[in-house]
Amino acid sequence: MGVSVEDIKKLRAKTSAGMGLCKEALEKSDGDMDKATEYINERSDVIGRLHNLTGAKIGLCKLALEETEKNFEKAVELIKEKGWDEPIEPECEIGNGVIDSYLHGTDQKLASLVEVKCKTDFVAKNDEFKAFAHELSLQVAAMKPKFISKDKIDQKELDELLDTFRKEVKAEGKPEEMAEKIVEGKLNKYYQENCLLQQKWFKDESKTMQNLLDESMTKLGEPLEITRILYWEFGK
């Protein structure tokens, strides 16, 4: 059956899934919104979509899904009921925080720097805060991210990336109905490889650096913000 653009947009607003996956879900479920939602939940990152849709921290999204027996819509309602959709404001007062550095190996030819801000001087001097900043420095040295997060990528550069991915998919001769889903997959992979907060923690790949940031804010009880990163390799 044909799927209208309006229904695709409606399902995207409901699930925070990509347009390609929403179209596929509606086609597979003959336009039934509930079945299409189930289809999406079985085939995509539910926690990531819940986080994108509500703004709640990853840990709280996981908790909401557990408490609602993995019912996406009920999890959204629970997050709103508990006020978890009002994340800690990332704005930080200037003057509180640290710059952490890491110099690799005896030859000292690889270094990383990270600037992390917090709200109070008390947290800036906290050992857990300093340990978190150092983990970020180690991650930057190990994984060489280009950006702090996907939100920091310039729109022009993002448009150029999408254009490149679409050309690659077209050149590969992929079916048109799958094209946008494949492009979305390529973009997500790019984020995971090049954006610090979207990267998997090199010490434990079950967590992302965003997970570590969320956990640190919860432990320390105030907003933290990664404001600058630098990776520097001798001769490059």
Image (cartoon, grey):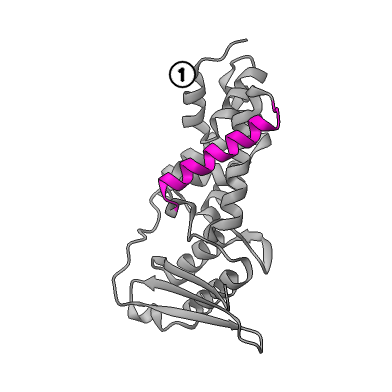
Amino acid type, callout 1: Glu
Residues in magenta?
A: 153-174
The answer, for residue 91, to whether it is visible in the render is yes
Front residue (pair 67, 175) = 175
Q: What residue sits right under mark 1 in the picture? A: 6
Please tell me which residue is depicted at 58% across the width and 11% down the height of the picture: 2
Q: Farthest residue toward the left?
A: 94
Dividing the picture into quadrants, the one containing residue 46 is top right
Please tell me which residue is depicted at 58% across the width and 66% down the height of the picture: 144
Q: Farthest residue toward the front?
A: 235
- Residue 177 location in percent, x, y? 64, 23
**Quadrant location of the C terminus in the rendered image:** bottom right
Q: Report crowding for label 1: few under 14, some 14 to 19, many 20 or more residues within 10 A (C-alpha).
A: few
Would residue 99 be counted in the magenta stretch?
no
Please tell me which residue is depicted at 29% across the width and 72% down the height of the picture: 94
Counting the numbered discs, the total is 1
**Quadrant location of the N terminus in the rendered image:** top right
In this rendering, would 110 be left or right of 220? right
Front residue (pair 104, 33) = 104
For mark 1, give the secondary structure: helix
- Residue 69 location in percent, x, y? 63, 41
Front residue (pair 196, 29) = 196
- Measured along the vertical axis of the image, is residue 63 above or below residue 182? below
Please tell me which residue is depicted at 59% across the width and 39% down the height of the picture: 165
Would residue 173 be counted in the magenta stretch?
yes
In this rendering, would 156 be left or right of 7? left
- Residue 199 location in percent, x, y? 59, 59
The answer, for residue 78, to whether it is visible in the render is no
